Amino acid sequence: MHAFPDIDRLKATLDQHRPLNPAIVRNLREDLIVRWTYHSNAIEGNTLTLQETKVALEGITIGGKSIREHLEAVNHMNAILLLEEMVQKDEPLTEWTIKSLHQLILKGIDDDNAGRYRTVNVRISGAEHLPPDQVRVPELMEQFISWYQTEGMALHPVERAARVHSDFVKIHPFVDGNGRTSRLLMNLELLKAGFPPAVLPVDRRLAYYIALDADHVRGETEGFVTMVGEIVKEGFRPYFHALGLPW
């Protein structure tokens, strides 16, 4: 069980200023959707820059970029919008929640596999961890949800968000889009618990993959939970800046 005293202090300070001014909320949300979409897609190899992502989300086509890259940006934004609805309804994490988010991620890119568990075996390029056999995916996903509803609920929200992310990726239930979906699920947990969303920056991709592999292959959870704690802490910075609070 991890404690996050620094993060709890930041949250307590932010909570004192709620409800936030609607103009601040709107401005932060627009910026966040662009940054979250850019970084999460860039981690997976999408070549749109931050500025190009912003323009693509406004519905403008960028020359020299593939339709797939445009779809990845728009799909990710739509998945965030669905996630926001889920947070408002305080929806629990279920297999339906997961499949609904995943379906949006692959919409128009791979409709046959969007929202459907894989029926083939896969390898994660560059990773030591070998995802489980496809026949075990439904059973492992059931166990994952059951863990979440029991032991997961006893954890600090930041640790729970990190474990949801890592344990989901370990199962790798979909052919494609697992990384993006896992980062959405992590933020679903954080947002439901009243934390700002955490954006994993693309420049930490290598450390991120190493921490996940250490968790999946050797059961070393510490590194990944610590990394998630660091990015959750960073998630408070834009709010404190907007409110003129000392950081």
Image (cartoon, rainbow, N blue to C red):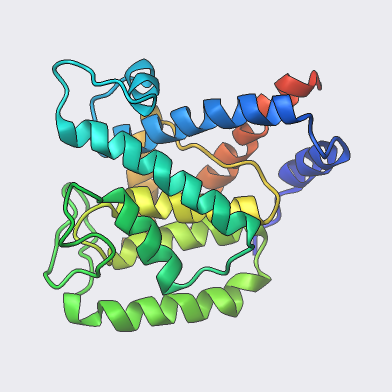
Classify the position of the C terminus by image quarter: top right
For residue 96, which quarter of the picture? bottom left
Which residue is more in the foreground, 239 or 111? 111
Residue 172: x and y in percent read 28, 63
- Residue 155 against residue 202 in the figure, above or below: below
Q: Is residue 84 visible?
A: yes
Query: Going by the image, does 176 lie left or right of 42?
Result: left
Residue 116: x and y in percent read 25, 68
Residue 84: x and y in percent read 56, 49
Count numbered badges in the picture: 0
Residue 42: x and y in percent read 30, 32
Which residue is more in the foreground, 233 or 54? 54
Which residue appears at 37% of the width and 76% of the height? 141
The residue at the far front in this view is 59
Which residue appears at 22% of the width and 32% of the height? 69
Classify the position of the N terminus by image quarter: bottom right
- Residue 138 against residue 164 in the figure, above or below: below
Which residue is more in the foreground, 49 or 99? 99
Query: Going by the image, does 192 lie left or right of 180?
Result: right
- Residue 217 against residue 7 in the figure, above or below: below
Query: Going by the image, does 38 lie left or right of 146?
Result: left
Which residue appears at 51% of the width and 52% of the height? 83
Which residue appears at 17% of the width and 15% of the height? 63
For residue 9, which quarter of the picture? top right
Q: Is residue 237 visible?
A: no
